[in-house]
Amino acid sequence: MFQTILAVFKDKDLGKKILIVAGLLVVSRFFAALPIPGTDPSALKSFFMQNQYLGLVNIFSGGALANFSIAMLGIGPYITASIILQLLTMIFPAMKAMYYEEGEIGRAKFVKYTRYATVFLAFFQGFAFLNLLKKQGVIGSLEPFELFRNIILVTAGSIIFMWLGELISEQKIGSGSSLIIFAGIITGMPTALRNNILTFDYAKIPSYMIFIALGLVTILGVILINESERRIPISYAKRVRGMKVFGGQNTYLPLKVNQAGVIPIIFAISILLFPGLVAQLLSLSNNDFLVKAGASIQGFFNNQLAYGLSYFILVFAFTYFYTLITFDPKEISKNIQQQGGFVPGIRPGQNTAEFLGKILFRITFLGAIFLGLIAVLPLMVQGLTGITSLTLGGTSLLIVVSVALDTIRQLKAQMLMRDYDTF
């Protein structure tokens, strides 16, 4: 491990990229700590401790929401916009053609539309959150001009986080959005640890032991599904060109049990945030029907069984959804055939694509079930231990471990590309 770290920093270009990413993450933490004027920190702290939904939102903002900073929405609007646009590719053929068939130009258009959607969502969510906090008496009374000013500040904060995430992704040592969330969770851990030590209750030692065991099981489970893969043998026919012979080699195509990494978890939580936000807004209405509708939605998601099932189903569905986006069996089969390769016992072309699709479906099913179970495991154990912070801790742990593994994998890939023999 230490030799790998030393090798990373010996490469000047790779070391420079790491320093750039670290610097951008520091900048993101600066904006997350930059508060909007006119807040009551004690009232905010009390409000967030009583609201599990906003606690989840706070994870995505990297603690910025609890600080009521200008980046209070964090990278959430950008992630939600990406989900919406990717879902549209499955509904509208023109969107699908733009994303998959138009190459770099199509991808650039797709990114541009995602940015526009991010601005719209950030403005809407900022308006909703500020009105919610205002009516709850957390931020006091705001004049129309002050409210509009704060909405603009919050929207600008989300745009800044989106920009920082794209700059980080350009360095190709991790997903910018995931790393920003990762940095927010990591920086909040010392405070959480200190609070747990100060409020330590000897009577709850068995519950704490279950909590620790849950954390270890979650870490091992995430590592297992992220590192497991099915290797498909690929053979290449010999080709004679002039006096040289090419091909005749055997290799394999690795199909990971969890091709999507941490993205299904982030997607699932992003979707779960919307009903809670709508319920919070409806509950503040003057209309009795809307208030009852908001209470019904809020009651549904306050039910641990309903929330857990929703979380599990969304993680399961998004694992398949993102895998199909990132791994196209037909395209992979076409590339293998063009390079003179074939799967032993399987005809090249359509048969190979069907074979890869069938195996991908099976192993993704196992990965999706396992990832969904790990996602809801903290909820199940929470019912046994009574530790209310367990849900947030489990979600944070899932994100931290998955992002760390993905970043390490990308670092190793860059090192392998630069200096194969030494590495």
Image: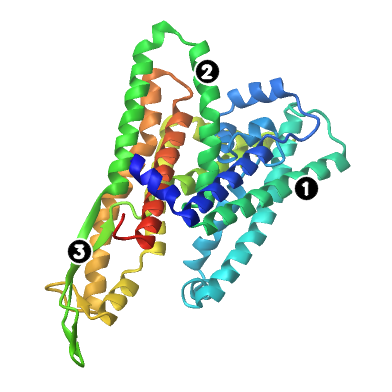
Q: Mark 1, mark 2: which one is toward the viewer?
A: 2
- Location of the C terminus by quadrant is bottom left
Cα distance in 3D space between marks 1 and 3: 52 Å
Question: Is residue 282 in view?
Answer: no
Q: What colour scheme was applied to this rendering of the protein?
A: rainbow
Q: Which one is in front, 374 or 253?
A: 253
Q: Earlier in the sequence, mark 1 or mark 3?
A: 1
* Residue 389 placement, left or right of 345: right
Number of labels in the image equals: 3
Mark 2: which amino acid? Arg
Q: Which one is in front, 66 or 340?
A: 340
Question: Is residue 12 in view?
Answer: yes
Q: Earlier in the sequence, mark 1 or mark 2?
A: 1
Vertical relation: 91 (above or below) 313? below
Residue beneath the point at 11% across and 73% down: 345
Vertical relation: 36 (above or below) 320? above
Query: SS for tag 1?
Result: helix
Residue 316 marker: none
Mark 1: which amino acid? Ile
| Within-10-Å neighbours for mark 2: few <14, some 14–19, many 20+ | few
The residue beneath circle 2 is 194
Q: Mark 1, mark 3: which one is toward the viewer?
A: 3
Please provide percent x and percent y for residue 106. Answer: 55, 74
Residue beneath the point at 35% across and 32% down: 377
Q: Quadrant of residue 59?
A: top right
The residue beneath circle 3 is 232
Q: Quadrant of residue 357?
A: bottom left
Cα distance in 3D space between marks 3 and 2: 48 Å
The residue beneath circle 1 is 152
Mark 3: which amino acid? Ile
Residue beneath the point at 75% across and 31% down: 135
Please provide percent x and percent y for residue 171. Answer: 52, 57
